[in-house]
Image: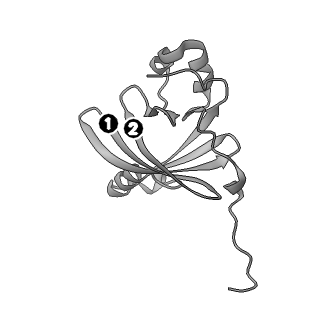
Amino acid sequence: MAGFPLAVVAQDDLPIDQSKLYVSDPAACDALEKKGVDAFMDSDFLVLSFKDGIQSMEFTCDLFDIKTLPNNNMLFVDAVCQAPGEVYPDTLSISPYDAKTLQVVSTYDAMMAMAAPADPAELTGNPGVTLYTRCDNLSEIRVD
């Protein structure tokens, strides 16, 4: 392998700001700022906080262990999630997608998507991936 440069992912130099709130719908940042928790009544979105986990109206995912490596900004997360009538463990990978967006990959969601009958017209991208946009103005607002 001598002579071959190491492949570097462009997102490696993007930091993950764990003090901020992230949402699965960019419009939710403004809705949360204006309406607080009542924003969930008008729109279906997920909120990711490294302090409080992932939340929506009927879904929560508590982050129990966040693992990192030196000189690497990708995170490996052990979680326990709850939805109506079910509780299950999950593992998540969290990595920068761009300067303001995180890509979260759920092992549970990916496995459920692959186990379901597939319609080729609906297959796009990686199963289990959700993009979360950082809300720079909401780091102090709690949504629980």
Gap between marks 1 and 2, in whole Å? 6 Å
Q: Position of residue 118 (x, y in %)?
A: 38, 56
Which of the marked residues, 1 or 2, is nearer the chain's N terminus?
A: 2
Query: What residue is disc 1 on?
Result: 82
Task: From the viewer's perspective, tell me whether residue 118 is left or right of residue 40.
Answer: left
Q: Residue at x 63, y 49 (%)?
A: 96
Query: What residue is disc 2 on?
Result: 61
* Residue most extreme to the bottom: 2
Going by the numbered disc 1, the residue's amino acid type is Gln
User: Marks 2 and 1: in contact by CB < 8 Å?
Assistant: yes
Q: Position of residue 91 (x, y in %)?
A: 41, 51
Q: Residue at x 43, y 22 (%)?
A: 144
Q: Position of residue 53 (x, y in %)?
A: 45, 35
Mark 1 Cα-neighbour bin, 10 Å: few <14, some 14–19, many ≥20: some
Corner quadrant of residue 119: bottom left
Task: From the viewer's perspective, tell me whether residue 1 is left or right of residue 93.
Answer: right
Residue 115 vertical placement versus 8 (above, below) = above
The residue lying toward the viewer, choosing from 138 and 42, is 138
Q: Residue at x 69, y 70 (%)?
A: 7
Quarter of the image with the N terminus in it: bottom right
Helix, strand or loop under label 1: strand
Q: Residue at x 43, y 31 (%)?
A: 55
* Residue most extreme to the left: 85
